[in-house]
Amino acid sequence: MSNSSTQIQLIQPDDWHLHIRDGDVMRDVLADTARQFARAIIMPNLKPPVTTVDLAKAYQSRIEANLKSLGISSFTPLMTLYLTDNTSAEEVRKAKDEGIVAPPVETGTGKVEAPKQEEDYDKVFTVVQIPAEFPGGLPAWTKYLERNLNRDLPVNNGAPPGKYTVVVSFIVDKNGGISEVQAENDPGYGTKEEAVRVIKKGPSWKPAVQNGRNVIYRHKQSITFQVSEE
């Protein structure tokens, strides 16, 4: 039996969690990091934090300027965003298009010098990590509408052929309870009232989740009535 072993040497690994700060500190950290790593995920925890694509690109420009002044061309910074309650879905999509990688999750017990933002988990959220959902998901929601929505109402009220979509807004509390049900538009022919009725009649929803906690969430749900040509 051979006692020989196989060795693997990592010549230039990636750093998946790098705080380079800004100013003179950035230059020193970049010089040390580039000697060991080919790429690094750059933490967005500045003061103020990197919360938008424009801020991320500006931060990247400062990093690249420092790399150039150091004569380093073999290191790639991977930019991220600092997500907050106010981060829009559009900003996240824009970040993806600009090549900004998925934001990191802080773990462990190591101290991170980052801006502390206390989350108010009792407020009404309009943007969350996991939105509220009808129990059973889309298939169950579709079945519920088939059984409970009076789709013939606009026809009975004389509506011409077309689609009539009502956007219903309502609160889903931490336990999934529904309240404050209201229509944000009214296409007419009784569709507004029927859409509100079917939401109020339904079961509790699966609550929204933010940072692993159930939160109060204002949800918007579209309900469409179709009137076909005879």
Image: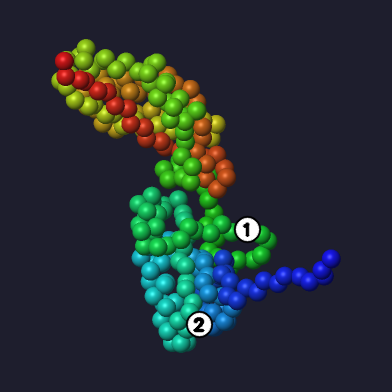
Residue 219 in the image, given as x and y percentages of width and height: 41, 36
Residue 42 horizontal side relative to residue 199, left or right = right
**In the picture, residue 187 is in which quadrant?**
top left
Residue 217 in the image, given as x and y percentages of width and height: 46, 38
Q: Is residue 141 above or below residue 52?
A: above
Residue occupying image coordinates x 39% and y 75%: 61
Give the SS element for disc 1.
loop
Residue 106 in the image, given as x and y percentages of width and height: 59, 59
Q: Is residue 221 above or below residue 126?
A: above
Q: Which residue is mark 2?
A: 27
Residue 141 in the image, given as x and y percentages of width and height: 42, 26
Residue 220 horizontal side relative to residue 203, left or right = left
Q: Identify residue type, mark 1.
A: Thr
Residue 200 horizontal side relative to residue 204, left or right = left
Residue, far right: 1
Quadrant containing the C terminus is top left
